[in-house]
Amino acid sequence: MNKPYIGVPIGDPAGIGPEIALKSASDSRVLELANPVLIGDTNVLQNLIDLYKLELKIIVIKENPKKLKFIAGNVYVHPVQNIDMEKLELGVVDAMCGQAAFEYIKKSVELSEMNFIDAIATTPINKESLKAANVPFIGHTEIFASLSDTNDPLTMFEIDKLRVFFLSRHVSLRVAIDMVKKARIMDYIKRSHEALARLGVKGTIAVAGLNPHSGEHGLFGWEEEEEIVPAIDEMKKQGYDVIGPIPADSIFAIGLSGKWAAILSLYHDQGHIATKTYDFHRTISITNGMPFLRTSVDHGTAMDIAGKNIANEISMSEAIILAAKYAPYFKKR
Protein backbone atom coordinates (compact mmCIF):
# COMPACT_ATOMS: atom_id res chain seq x y z
CA MET A 1 0.00 0.00 0.00
CA ASN A 2 1.36 3.42 -0.99
CA LYS A 3 0.37 5.55 1.96
CA PRO A 4 -0.04 9.29 1.30
CA TYR A 5 2.36 11.70 2.97
CA ILE A 6 0.33 14.20 5.01
CA GLY A 7 1.94 17.46 6.12
CA VAL A 8 0.95 18.55 9.64
CA PRO A 9 1.95 22.12 10.60
CA ILE A 10 1.99 21.99 14.40
CA GLY A 11 0.03 25.21 14.97
CA ASP A 12 0.46 27.67 17.82
CA PRO A 13 3.37 26.41 19.98
CA ALA A 14 1.68 27.71 23.13
CA GLY A 15 -1.56 25.80 22.44
CA ILE A 16 -2.47 22.14 22.12
CA GLY A 17 -1.45 21.89 18.45
CA PRO A 18 2.01 20.39 19.05
CA GLU A 19 0.57 17.92 21.57
CA ILE A 20 -2.17 16.57 19.31
CA ALA A 21 0.26 16.54 16.37
CA LEU A 22 2.61 14.27 18.32
CA LYS A 23 -0.15 12.01 19.57
CA SER A 24 -1.84 11.66 16.18
CA ALA A 25 1.49 11.05 14.43
CA SER A 26 1.97 8.02 16.68
CA ASP A 27 -1.66 6.82 16.46
CA SER A 28 -1.75 3.28 15.06
CA ARG A 29 -4.93 4.04 13.07
CA VAL A 30 -3.17 6.97 11.41
CA LEU A 31 0.00 5.01 10.68
CA GLU A 32 -1.99 2.29 8.92
CA LEU A 33 -3.23 4.80 6.36
CA ALA A 34 -0.78 7.71 6.21
CA ASN A 35 2.77 8.89 6.70
CA PRO A 36 2.44 12.05 8.83
CA VAL A 37 5.11 14.71 8.32
CA LEU A 38 5.08 17.23 11.17
CA ILE A 39 6.17 20.77 10.27
CA GLY A 40 7.44 22.92 13.11
CA ASP A 41 10.08 23.63 15.72
CA THR A 42 11.70 20.41 16.92
CA ASN A 43 12.56 22.01 20.28
CA VAL A 44 8.86 22.59 20.96
CA LEU A 45 8.07 18.98 20.16
CA GLN A 46 11.01 17.54 22.09
CA ASN A 47 10.01 19.60 25.12
CA LEU A 48 6.58 17.93 25.12
CA ILE A 49 8.06 14.48 24.56
CA ASP A 50 10.25 15.00 27.63
CA LEU A 51 7.49 16.65 29.68
CA TYR A 52 4.98 13.87 28.99
CA LYS A 53 7.58 11.08 28.95
CA LEU A 54 6.43 9.92 25.52
CA GLU A 55 8.30 7.01 23.95
CA LEU A 56 8.89 8.84 20.70
CA LYS A 57 12.00 9.75 18.75
CA ILE A 58 12.15 12.76 16.47
CA ILE A 59 13.59 12.14 13.02
CA VAL A 60 14.55 15.42 11.36
CA ILE A 61 13.90 15.55 7.62
CA LYS A 62 15.16 18.39 5.43
CA GLU A 63 14.66 16.88 1.99
CA ASN A 64 11.97 14.72 0.40
CA PRO A 65 10.24 12.61 3.10
CA LYS A 66 9.05 10.23 0.41
CA LYS A 67 12.59 8.84 0.28
CA LEU A 68 12.31 7.65 3.88
CA LYS A 69 10.78 4.52 5.36
CA PHE A 70 8.44 5.53 8.17
CA ILE A 71 8.74 3.39 11.31
CA ALA A 72 6.37 3.34 14.29
CA GLY A 73 7.87 4.99 17.36
CA ASN A 74 9.51 7.71 15.26
CA VAL A 75 8.01 11.13 14.61
CA TYR A 76 9.16 12.63 11.32
CA VAL A 77 9.55 16.40 11.40
CA HIS A 78 10.43 18.96 8.76
CA PRO A 79 12.11 21.55 10.99
CA VAL A 80 11.19 25.23 11.14
CA GLN A 81 13.20 26.54 14.08
CA ASN A 82 11.61 29.79 15.20
CA ILE A 83 10.88 29.55 18.94
CA ASP A 84 12.99 30.88 21.82
CA MET A 85 12.28 28.15 24.36
CA GLU A 86 13.27 30.41 27.26
CA LYS A 87 10.44 32.77 26.31
CA LEU A 88 7.80 30.17 25.44
CA GLU A 89 4.94 29.98 27.96
CA LEU A 90 2.40 27.26 27.30
CA GLY A 91 -1.16 28.54 27.41
CA VAL A 92 -0.21 32.19 26.86
CA VAL A 93 -1.02 34.28 23.79
CA ASP A 94 2.26 35.45 22.27
CA ALA A 95 3.30 37.23 19.07
CA MET A 96 6.28 34.89 18.73
CA CYS A 97 3.90 31.93 18.59
CA GLY A 98 1.53 33.63 16.15
CA GLN A 99 4.40 34.31 13.77
CA ALA A 100 5.71 30.77 14.21
CA ALA A 101 2.31 29.23 13.41
CA PHE A 102 2.11 31.31 10.23
CA GLU A 103 5.59 30.16 9.16
CA TYR A 104 4.66 26.49 9.67
CA ILE A 105 1.65 26.93 7.39
CA LYS A 106 3.75 28.71 4.80
CA LYS A 107 6.28 25.87 4.84
CA SER A 108 3.50 23.29 4.40
CA VAL A 109 2.39 25.06 1.21
CA GLU A 110 5.97 25.10 -0.07
CA LEU A 111 6.33 21.36 0.61
CA SER A 112 3.07 20.70 -1.22
CA GLU A 113 4.26 22.70 -4.23
CA MET A 114 7.44 20.61 -4.25
CA ASN A 115 5.30 17.43 -4.13
CA PHE A 116 7.04 16.42 -0.89
CA ILE A 117 3.62 15.94 0.73
CA ASP A 118 0.30 14.83 -0.78
CA ALA A 119 -2.06 16.84 1.44
CA ILE A 120 -2.09 19.10 4.50
CA ALA A 121 -3.89 18.50 7.82
CA THR A 122 -3.79 21.50 10.12
CA THR A 123 -3.72 21.85 13.88
CA PRO A 124 -5.35 24.90 15.53
CA ILE A 125 -3.90 28.40 15.46
CA ASN A 126 -4.82 31.34 17.67
CA LYS A 127 -6.38 34.50 16.20
CA GLU A 128 -5.08 36.67 19.05
CA SER A 129 -1.53 35.40 18.57
CA LEU A 130 -1.74 36.09 14.84
CA LYS A 131 -2.94 39.62 15.54
CA ALA A 132 -0.18 40.18 18.10
CA ALA A 133 2.35 39.16 15.44
CA ASN A 134 0.77 41.51 12.89
CA VAL A 135 -0.05 38.57 10.63
CA PRO A 136 -2.74 40.13 8.39
CA PHE A 137 -5.11 37.15 8.37
CA ILE A 138 -7.88 36.02 10.71
CA GLY A 139 -7.38 32.28 10.27
CA HIS A 140 -6.19 29.28 8.29
CA THR A 141 -8.56 29.66 5.35
CA GLU A 142 -7.52 33.24 4.69
CA ILE A 143 -3.82 32.36 5.02
CA PHE A 144 -4.05 29.43 2.62
CA ALA A 145 -6.12 31.50 0.18
CA SER A 146 -3.42 34.16 0.08
CA LEU A 147 -0.50 31.72 -0.17
CA SER A 148 -2.19 29.79 -2.99
CA ASP A 149 -3.73 32.80 -4.75
CA THR A 150 -7.20 31.31 -4.31
CA ASN A 151 -10.33 33.46 -4.36
CA ASP A 152 -12.98 32.50 -1.78
CA PRO A 153 -11.99 28.92 -0.82
CA LEU A 154 -14.88 26.55 -0.24
CA THR A 155 -15.27 24.99 3.22
CA MET A 156 -16.75 21.51 3.57
CA PHE A 157 -17.35 19.50 6.74
CA GLU A 158 -17.40 15.72 6.74
CA ILE A 159 -18.62 13.42 9.48
CA ASP A 160 -19.56 9.82 8.72
CA LYS A 161 -21.78 9.89 5.59
CA LEU A 162 -22.56 13.59 5.90
CA ARG A 163 -20.79 16.33 3.92
CA VAL A 164 -21.73 19.98 4.37
CA PHE A 165 -20.75 23.07 2.35
CA PHE A 166 -21.34 26.61 3.63
CA LEU A 167 -22.73 29.55 1.67
CA SER A 168 -21.00 31.95 4.09
CA ARG A 169 -18.41 31.71 6.85
CA HIS A 170 -17.37 34.24 9.49
CA VAL A 171 -19.92 37.01 9.13
CA SER A 172 -22.78 38.15 11.36
CA LEU A 173 -26.10 36.36 11.03
CA ARG A 174 -27.64 39.56 9.63
CA VAL A 175 -24.99 39.72 6.90
CA ALA A 176 -25.27 35.97 6.27
CA ILE A 177 -28.99 36.32 5.56
CA ASP A 178 -28.29 39.19 3.19
CA MET A 179 -25.87 36.89 1.31
CA VAL A 180 -28.61 34.36 0.49
CA LYS A 181 -28.97 35.51 -3.10
CA LYS A 182 -29.78 33.61 -6.30
CA ALA A 183 -26.45 34.32 -7.99
CA ARG A 184 -24.40 33.28 -4.95
CA ILE A 185 -26.39 30.09 -4.42
CA MET A 186 -25.95 29.14 -8.08
CA ASP A 187 -22.22 29.78 -7.85
CA TYR A 188 -21.89 27.66 -4.73
CA ILE A 189 -23.91 24.77 -6.18
CA LYS A 190 -21.58 24.77 -9.18
CA ARG A 191 -18.41 25.05 -7.09
CA SER A 192 -19.60 22.41 -4.63
CA HIS A 193 -20.14 19.92 -7.46
CA GLU A 194 -16.66 20.72 -8.78
CA ALA A 195 -15.13 20.27 -5.32
CA LEU A 196 -16.81 16.89 -4.90
CA ALA A 197 -15.57 15.79 -8.33
CA ARG A 198 -11.97 16.62 -7.35
CA LEU A 199 -12.43 14.34 -4.34
CA GLY A 200 -13.86 11.53 -6.47
CA VAL A 201 -17.41 11.98 -5.14
CA LYS A 202 -20.56 12.02 -7.29
CA GLY A 203 -24.21 12.57 -6.38
CA THR A 204 -26.93 15.00 -5.42
CA ILE A 205 -26.41 18.26 -3.53
CA ALA A 206 -29.32 19.13 -1.24
CA VAL A 207 -29.83 22.80 -0.39
CA ALA A 208 -31.04 23.68 3.10
CA GLY A 209 -33.89 26.07 3.69
CA LEU A 210 -33.23 29.35 5.47
CA ASN A 211 -36.52 29.94 7.29
CA PRO A 212 -38.62 27.57 9.46
CA HIS A 213 -40.18 24.89 7.25
CA SER A 214 -38.39 26.52 4.29
CA GLY A 215 -40.68 29.52 4.59
CA GLU A 216 -43.98 27.67 3.93
CA HIS A 217 -44.39 29.43 0.55
CA GLY A 218 -43.74 32.86 1.98
CA LEU A 219 -45.60 32.55 5.29
CA PHE A 220 -42.39 32.64 7.35
CA GLY A 221 -40.03 34.48 5.04
CA TRP A 222 -39.57 35.29 1.38
CA GLU A 223 -35.97 34.14 0.71
CA GLU A 224 -36.96 30.64 -0.42
CA GLU A 225 -39.48 31.86 -2.99
CA GLU A 226 -37.45 34.79 -4.32
CA GLU A 227 -33.85 33.57 -4.15
CA ILE A 228 -33.32 29.90 -3.21
CA VAL A 229 -35.92 28.10 -5.35
CA PRO A 230 -35.12 30.14 -8.49
CA ALA A 231 -31.41 29.35 -8.02
CA ILE A 232 -32.07 25.62 -7.68
CA ASP A 233 -34.44 25.58 -10.66
CA GLU A 234 -31.89 27.37 -12.84
CA MET A 235 -29.10 24.98 -11.87
CA LYS A 236 -31.33 22.00 -12.65
CA LYS A 237 -31.89 23.45 -16.13
CA GLN A 238 -28.12 23.63 -16.52
CA GLY A 239 -27.85 19.92 -15.73
CA TYR A 240 -26.74 20.02 -12.09
CA ASP A 241 -27.94 17.31 -9.70
CA VAL A 242 -29.46 19.47 -6.97
CA ILE A 243 -32.65 19.47 -4.88
CA GLY A 244 -34.24 21.65 -2.24
CA PRO A 245 -34.79 23.73 -0.32
CA ILE A 246 -35.25 21.16 2.45
CA PRO A 247 -36.10 22.42 5.96
CA ALA A 248 -33.00 22.77 8.11
CA ASP A 249 -34.59 20.90 11.02
CA SER A 250 -34.55 17.66 9.01
CA ILE A 251 -32.00 17.97 6.20
CA PHE A 252 -28.95 17.09 8.30
CA ALA A 253 -30.56 14.05 9.92
CA ILE A 254 -31.51 12.76 6.47
CA GLY A 255 -28.03 13.60 5.16
CA LEU A 256 -26.43 11.37 7.79
CA SER A 257 -28.05 8.37 6.07
CA GLY A 258 -25.93 9.02 2.99
CA LYS A 259 -28.95 9.96 0.87
CA TRP A 260 -27.06 12.81 -0.82
CA ALA A 261 -23.46 13.51 -1.76
CA ALA A 262 -23.53 16.77 0.21
CA ILE A 263 -25.67 19.50 1.74
CA LEU A 264 -25.34 23.24 1.11
CA SER A 265 -25.83 25.01 4.45
CA LEU A 266 -26.91 28.61 4.06
CA TYR A 267 -24.85 30.03 6.92
CA HIS A 268 -22.06 29.12 9.34
CA ASP A 269 -23.92 27.96 12.46
CA GLN A 270 -26.68 26.15 10.58
CA GLY A 271 -24.23 23.45 9.50
CA HIS A 272 -21.75 23.74 12.36
CA ILE A 273 -24.33 23.06 15.05
CA ALA A 274 -25.72 20.05 13.20
CA THR A 275 -22.37 18.37 12.58
CA LYS A 276 -20.71 19.16 15.90
CA THR A 277 -23.74 18.09 17.93
CA TYR A 278 -23.63 14.73 16.18
CA ASP A 279 -19.88 14.22 16.83
CA PHE A 280 -17.77 17.17 17.91
CA HIS A 281 -14.38 15.44 17.79
CA ARG A 282 -14.84 13.68 14.45
CA THR A 283 -16.26 16.59 12.48
CA ILE A 284 -13.46 17.47 10.06
CA SER A 285 -13.12 20.51 7.83
CA ILE A 286 -11.89 20.31 4.24
CA THR A 287 -10.91 23.48 2.38
CA ASN A 288 -11.71 23.09 -1.32
CA GLY A 289 -10.84 25.17 -4.34
CA MET A 290 -7.09 25.37 -3.68
CA PRO A 291 -4.25 23.69 -5.60
CA PHE A 292 -3.73 21.30 -2.66
CA LEU A 293 -5.96 19.26 -0.37
CA ARG A 294 -6.29 20.61 3.16
CA THR A 295 -8.18 19.10 6.09
CA SER A 296 -8.37 20.47 9.61
CA VAL A 297 -9.57 19.93 13.12
CA ASP A 298 -12.48 22.20 13.90
CA HIS A 299 -11.56 23.28 17.40
CA GLY A 300 -9.32 25.92 18.90
CA THR A 301 -5.93 26.08 20.62
CA ALA A 302 -7.43 25.32 24.06
CA MET A 303 -4.86 27.45 25.87
CA ASP A 304 -6.37 26.48 29.24
CA ILE A 305 -5.22 22.86 28.92
CA ALA A 306 -1.97 23.37 26.98
CA GLY A 307 0.95 21.54 28.58
CA LYS A 308 -1.25 19.28 30.73
CA ASN A 309 -1.17 16.15 28.53
CA ILE A 310 -4.98 15.94 28.44
CA ALA A 311 -5.73 17.28 24.95
CA ASN A 312 -7.87 14.92 22.87
CA GLU A 313 -6.15 14.04 19.59
CA ILE A 314 -9.11 12.23 18.01
CA SER A 315 -10.01 15.16 15.75
CA MET A 316 -6.40 15.54 14.60
CA SER A 317 -6.13 11.83 13.84
CA GLU A 318 -9.40 11.98 11.91
CA ALA A 319 -8.16 14.99 9.93
CA ILE A 320 -5.04 13.09 8.85
CA ILE A 321 -7.05 9.97 8.03
CA LEU A 322 -9.51 11.98 5.94
CA ALA A 323 -6.65 13.68 4.09
CA ALA A 324 -5.22 10.24 3.35
CA LYS A 325 -8.64 9.04 2.17
CA TYR A 326 -9.03 11.77 -0.43
CA ALA A 327 -5.40 12.37 -1.42
CA PRO A 328 -5.35 9.60 -4.10
CA TYR A 329 -8.43 11.12 -5.79
CA PHE A 330 -7.57 14.78 -5.45
CA LYS A 331 -6.70 16.34 -8.80
CA LYS A 332 -4.10 19.07 -8.53
CA ARG A 333 -4.53 22.05 -10.84
Image (cartoon, grey):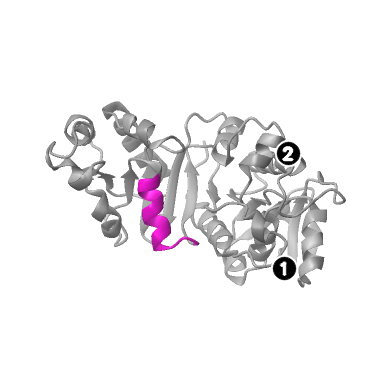
Extent of the magenta region: 269-281
Image mark count: 2
**Would you say residue 201 sits in the magenta stretch?**
no
Residue 183 found in image quarter: top left
Return the x and y of residue 14 as percentages of the image width and height: 72, 52
The residue that disc 1 covers is 71
Vertical order, 313 against 330 (above or below): below
1 or 208: which is nearer to us?
Answer: 208
Q: Is residue 224 left or right of residue 80?
A: left
Q: Residue at x 62, y 52 (%)?
A: 301
Q: Main secondary structure of the magenta part?
A: helix
Comes first in the chain, label 1 or label 2: 1
6 with respect to 293 (left or right):
right
Q: Label 2 belongs to which residue? A: 99
**Which x, y percent locates residue 212?**
21, 46
Residue drawn at point x = 13 percent, y = 36 percent: 218
Residue at 45% across, 42% down: 155
Classify 10 Å Cα crowding around label 1: few (below 14), some (14-19), many (20 and above). few
**Dot 2: what SS?**
helix
Residue 273 disc label: none
Q: Is residue 56 visible?
A: no
